[in-house]
Amino acid sequence: MQLLRIHYQKLFVCVSFIMLVLVVVRVWEADGGSPSPRQTQASSSKTHEKRVNSGRENNINIDTPVLSPRHGGRGGNKASGANIFADLFQDLAKEETCPLCFGHDLCEDVSAGFLTLATDTPHGQNGDSIYEAHLGDMHKLSVKVPLGNHFSRLDEAVCKNASLGEGCNVGSAAYKSFLARPQPLSPQLIHHLLRSVGIPRTQYPLLMCPSKKLLSVIERSFDDNDDHSLSQDERIALYTTLTIAPDIVVLKLLTKANLNVGFPRLVGVCGRVGVLEGELTPLASLLDEPFNVRASLAAQILTMVDDFMEDDPEWYLFYGLWSLDKLAVNKEGEVVLTDLANMAVVDKNLFRDYEDGNENRAQEVCNKECFQKFTGEVYRESHDTDEVCSRVEDVGHLMYAAVCAMILSDMEQHKYVDYFTSATNQQKQPRSTRGLLHDIPASDRATVEELLAECVDEAAPGGRLQAAQELRDFLSDFLLDDDDDDGDNGEEVSNTKNDDGDDYDDDDYDYGEDEG
């Protein structure tokens, strides 16, 4: 009997051990071989730190849960998960060409599956292909890929200069080419880069007034590690971006200068693509919105022009190619300019000094012909930079005229206005789209159209500036009045128009603070 009891005890131990092994195996299979809690916690801590740092650097909040590379989360194909377009993303980025690229600060996020494409079908925008992307499962971003043959021509020039033959490894050739020579950034160097890819200087507004101060800030914008000097890789990326994507240069420069006056936020770059904030609604798609909404958007655009000129004590932003298709509205309801490649950044130290009393600002009417004469001079190859650039401030108010004529007005006489063709060109075609301010309420039509007419063609010196400011204040009241009507629950509303403009609410814009 004692012997039988011993055998039963041994059998029980064996069965218990086998069952324990089976339980462990099943649990392991169910977890998919997941790491230990300690490993998971450490990994999560590092990921959180990375997201916080990235958010601080790129001025966009990305401190939210991200997807593991092996998990889906947007519905649909969970098996393929977040990496369904991973190969396409890698192919678009061409990280292996670096440093002959825009940089690689986001490449780790792409490789880890934190930053993923949401579609393989792009849409065109200002000469670029735009893909929708996701950061984790929360943020929608835009991946911008330059179109055209500029990159292939730059690759060819670098291979040839490095004496490595056509089709060489450009990532290696860059170090043996003229791009690797330590030399300060200068207009002559940029002109050489532009010639190598076949870009005329007249199509490069960033160089409209290239002061030494401007070139210095551009260089500092590519000092990614903030060591106050450019490494060889940083300098080559600077030259590449200047040549291929001046819009990225402008965004980096404005971020460095603490200016955020109506642009999509740059999240970062990976290889030969740029990543910007997404969820932008083209302004042209909002033409059927109620008039009070369109009036508010128009007021924002006029405020944007004012900010370009006055927001910063050091920099003046000059933009000439205003049109409806170059503007969009972000998810916060802010109007942003999507075509930064045609932005000129001008050092205000180049302007004339009117404070000594020896010279007065020119007081004369300046309309379309005046604007075309100025732009013809400023983009001429051999122009006197100091003389022409000193007059930018005197003619910059014509940005209001372009906005009023080509975006806001729906008046018949303004549908033929074109600020960007020769004054002798008689083959003018009417604008195909409606103006943002179409169908003005009858009670306000006369006032709005009178201000628009003076904004486009001023009748007296200073008339355009006054009309633009009055139009902005008048239009801003439409949305404020609508909000008052909705919020008062039938209570009496006070006088809706304030002649001195005190009711204008600029809180819709998060333009940041000047920090010098």
Image (cartoon, rainbow, N blue to C red):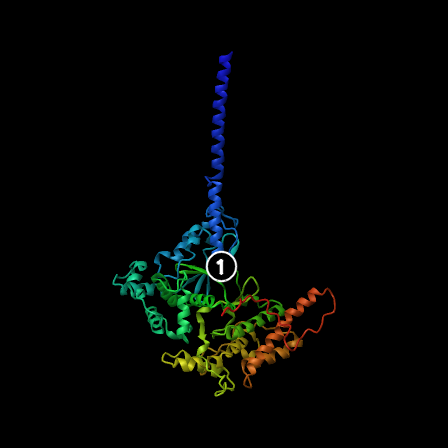
Considering the numbered disc 1 on the image, is that residue within a helix, a strand or a loop?
helix
Residue at image position (64%, 71%) is 478
Q: How many marks?
A: 1
Q: 371 or 33: nearer the eye?
A: 33
In the image, residue 197 sits, relative to residue 400, either above or below, namely: above
Q: x%, y% of residue 6?
A: 49, 16
Q: 329 or 505: nearer the eye?
A: 505
Q: Which image quadrant for residue 205?
A: bottom left
Q: x%, y% of residue 432?
A: 52, 72
Q: Decide if residue 425 is in sight here.
A: no
Q: x%, y% of residue 21?
A: 47, 29
The outermost residue toward the bottom is 358
The outermost residue toward the top is 1
Q: Is residue 484 left or right of residue 280?
A: right
Q: Which image quadrant for residue 351?
A: bottom left
Q: x%, y% of residue 332?
A: 57, 62
Three-letter code, disc 1: Arg
In the image, residue 91 sits, relative to residue 180, either above or below, namely: above
- Tag 1 residue: 56
The outermost residue toward the right is 491
